[in-house]
Image (spheres, coloured by chain):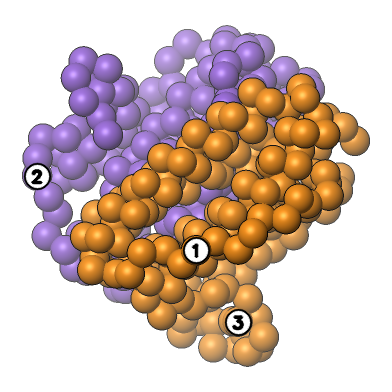
Chain colours: A purple, B orange
Amino acid sequence: MISGEAGASRRDFVVRIARAAGISPLVLGVLAGRGEALVPGEEADLAILYAALALEHHAIALYDVGLERGLFPAGLRAHAVEFRGDHLGHRDTQVAIAEERGGRPPEALASYELGPLQPGDRFVQRALEIEVAAQRAYTGLISQIRTRDYLLSAAFILVDEVRHMTVWRRALGLQIY
Amino acid sequence: MDSTGRQGARSARRRLLGLIALSPAAAWLPAAARLEATDYAGSREVLDAIDAFEVDVASRLEALEVAVPAARAFVESLSRDHLRHREDRRTLRRRLGLEPAPSPPDAAAEDVDLAGLRAAQEALVFAHAEGLPAMGDPAAVDTLARHMVDLSRHLTVIDLWIEGES
């Protein structure tokens, strides 16, 4: 349960990443903990799908840049490749779910404000940030999903995000248990 | 991570589940493949399964702690999470009007086997993931999803441990 200053700080962090990814104000409000609840149903599921997709696009963009420019430490490149592949899979699954429901899933932005990009541990830290944001967004939104099949997919995506986050935390020497 | 094939198997299952999620598009999937994802009938069945899988993991962790004293901090950390999760589930059962968890079977000391621990941990994670759609209660989904985050982290730590030993 998020509470107090630490909770507010965590929410700010997730909202900052989510806003940069292009997430809708409706879902941003939920992530910001402003008390708004999505009205359960198809529309809410699509709003969550689109928010999740925006984060996946953002994550793919970050991994693309990191891999293209050799910003990941050599020993961690295989993990980066694997995680990028996972995000592509999440994206494709959610695009398919949205289209099946007659939605128009958002495409990736033309460009992302990724900020200064430095190699090595600093870039791993950037990858960790987007994974933490994704994990917190999925965790915060999953209980608002009403469609069984999307809920199942979101659950397995969340398992992936935690895995990515844990691997990067360990690479940075942060506590993982 | 892919070298052992574990990750590949896991990814394959996730891809399959992704396809299953797209129900009309997956009509061609053989019945056996559809059955790979457990389709829980309701919240009691989910919670009973989770309780049973957690007992299995806990017994394996106990055996590990005895055999590998260096694993003590790891085991203690996971056990604290299990304790908190169990208490949350107890509260959840009360709120949902479900019977208390059945008494766990005697936890026989398991062989110290990281692969076995990993398999048991993965079963526990999957029970959460596959159980969420059957809960039918947003607050219950929220609670179990947060537990699943802890458990997925545990699973990754075990993976990293296995990777370090290979």
Query: How many numbered marks, from 0 up?
Result: 3
- Residue occupying image coordinates x 37% and y 37%: A136
Residue at position x 76%, y 22% in the image: B70
**Where in the figure is residue A139, as x and y percent of width and height?**
36, 44
Give, as a three-letter code, the residue at label 2. Glu
Q: Position of residue B7 (x, y in %)?
A: 74, 50
Mark 1 belongs to which subunit?
B
Q: Which residue is mark 1?
A: B103
Q: Which mark is residue B35?
A: 3
The residue that disc 2 covers is: A36
The 10 Å Cα crowd at callout 2, few under 14, some 14 to 19, many 20 or more, is: few
- The amino acid pointed to by label 1 is Ser
Q: Amino acid at mark 3?
A: Leu
> At x 30% / y 43%, what residue is drawn?
A140
* Tag nearer the camera, 3 or 2: 3
Taking depth in this image into account, of A86 and B165 the one nearest to the observer is: B165
Same chain letter for marks 1 and 3: yes
**Residue that appears at 11% across and 60% down:** A39
Q: Is residue B66 left or right of residue B126?
A: right
Q: Secondary structure at mark 1?
A: loop
Distance in Å between CA atoms under marks 3 and 2: 38 Å
